[in-house]
Amino acid sequence: MTARLIDLEVLAGVLSAAAWLAAAGCAAARRRRPAAVLAVVAVLALLARIGLVVALGRAGWWFVQDKLTVTLPLAAVTAVAAGLVALTARRWTAPALAVAGYAAAAGPVLALFAGYPAGWGTGLVTAGTVALAGVVTWQAAGHRPRRAPFVWLLALAPIVLGAAVAVPPPASADDGGHGVQVSSVRGPDPEAAAASGIPVRRFTLTARTATVALASGQRIQAWTFDGRVPGPALEVTQGDLVVVTLRNADIAAGVTLHWHGYDVPVGEDGVAGMTQDAVRPGESFEYRFRADRAGTYWYHTHEASDRAVRLGLYGTLVVRPRAAADGVDLTLPLHTFGTALAVGDRDQPTTHAVAPGTPVRLRVINTDDGPHRLTLTGPFRLVAVDGTDLNGPGVLERVAVRLPAGARVDVAVTAGAAPVTLHVDDGRATVRLAPAADTPAPPVDTAAWPTLDQTRYGTPAPTPFDAHSRFDRRFTMVLDRGVALADGLPKYAFTVNGRAYPYVTTQTVREGDLVHLTVVNRSRDTHPMHLHGHHVLALRHNGRPFTGSPLWMDTFDVQPGEVWEVGLRADNPGVWMNHCHNLKHAAKGMAVHLAYAGYQAASHHAHGA
Ligand code: C2O
Ligand code: CU
């Protein structure tokens, strides 16, 4: 709804601008009638915009701030002025109508290229640009003012002044030059752990380029761990100390391991340029962390990750509880290679032979940049989200589960005499559970099934805090597209609060703080937001509380027009990435640091997500 209002308001702005300019053209050609009609259309479009902005404002101030403070006043003032000119100084009607058109156009232009927050600088530059365009039109229409330089100055001055205000010296994402180096905050020492009886599980992952054949025979030029995509499945037991040696054979870009969703000590977090340097070809790095939390996770490189994860530098991490459940337990990482959607390394429908009556847990992991839609052709329960079990998950049928980029869901089904099929994106990929590989399964069309509303699924349970708690810190992240400085150059970036990484103001917390995050999506793309090192508790969605099972997430999808409120306890000191897990968006600016006071990132220029 909100997303549609955003689009309509832009559209109304375009229509209004087009009508004013067409009216100006008619007036210049001395065709009064059509000019008057077009002007009326322009005014109606302006009124429609005002109505839309009022409706949009109910979704939140962030959605309308630029319109209320800059573009609507400008459009209204110039419209009134054009009307007055038309009535009193007829020979200047055409340029006046044109100025109203420029002012109307400022709405959509600002909405698409700047947006929230629109401050004084933006306002001045916008007004100045409209004035400048007006002066040019006025002179083109035949007026040669004696004081031309003065008139030009009048239009140029606000632009220069506004630009000076709008482009403050970039606040760098680096946090002072002192404090504990995050690279020194490491996991437990394996020898000491072994001596005290903690099971130590060792793995070695070697990053290298390889030509890999998928199940269909399709060959891909991949970046791999151990020559495979996905990399080796890491499976450990809760309580283990996990020790992983990463070697880089020939990935020239460098490589790291980030434990997505696992709240490891910051020095093990694998963010190149921040918690460690990227591991270059011939080098290695040892990661170690206690597997203190059971669930479904994944790992991936965090250097040039937009490209590198797409090419295959990822794998799964499953931590099983000590008392293992019986039944079948399948880990199903989804990944797109070119046009093929693969489950693990299978880009063709697969069947698992499961005896009727067997409980099955499907751990579905989205390693792509966009969401996937999961459907099951039999009753199921959604038992875990992002590695955390849900409370009282009820049985679901004929309903789809949306799986955001980077996120995981665990789904429980009981195998029957008839096959049960998991469809991804209504059949782009399928995984079948059947008594035998050749058990026939009737095709099922799942495309029309509704999507599960996770804000009300499961039953409530006590949480350490809730939406009404007293929060020590509150941060708002308004996600949008816009022109912003990124890596020293202005780009059409994916922005947070109007800025692009690394120039987004750092979110600074103290250890122990209860932190409230409001995430607003003003853009047309969905943004799966991922905070490293912490799980957030979902509090409110579009202002309404979550009323089902507590939802602890590390990746939550903020869809266009949505507002998410989440909370977290700052209990894992360090400097952490907080970014969109559409890695293309992260690479183009949609990332920020969450830093604990007294901690400092290892080097000052993180390469971004
Ligand atoms: Cu899975 Cu910073 O990412
Ligand atoms: Cu995004």
Image (tube, rainbow, N blue to C red):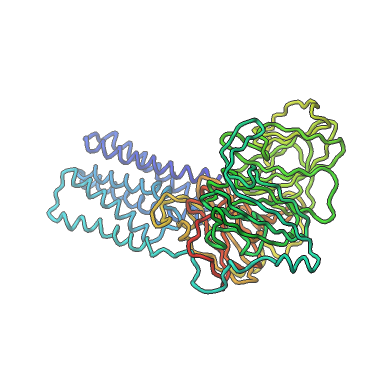
Asked whether 323 or 113 is in front, the reply is 323
Q: Is 549 placed above or below 429 here?
A: below
Residue, far right: 357
Q: Residue at x 72, y 33 (%)?
A: 350
Count every numbered label the image shows and give the total: 0
Asked whether 351 or 148 is in front, the reply is 351
**Whether residue 72 can be seen here:** no
Q: In which quadrant will I find the C terminus?
A: bottom right
Residue, far left: 146
Q: Is residue 63 left or right of residue 190?
A: left
Asked whether 519 or 203 is in front, the reply is 203
Q: Residue at x 37, y 38 (%)?
A: 41
Q: Which quarter of the figure has residue 19?
A: top left
**Whether residue 107 can be seen here:** yes
Q: Is 135 placed above or below 518 here?
A: above
Q: In which quadrant will I find the N terminus?
A: top right
Q: Is residue 565 left or right of residue 501?
A: right
Task: Give residue 301's position: percent from left, percent from top.
Answer: 59, 52
Task: Give residue 498's position: percent from left, percent from top.
Answer: 45, 56
Q: Which quarter of the figure has residue 517?
A: bottom right
Task: Give residue 565's position: percent from left, percent from top.
Answer: 61, 58
Q: Is residue 442 left or right of residue 447?
A: right
Asked whether 472 or 237 is in front, the reply is 237
Task: Give residue 513's position: percent from left, percent from top.
Answer: 63, 70
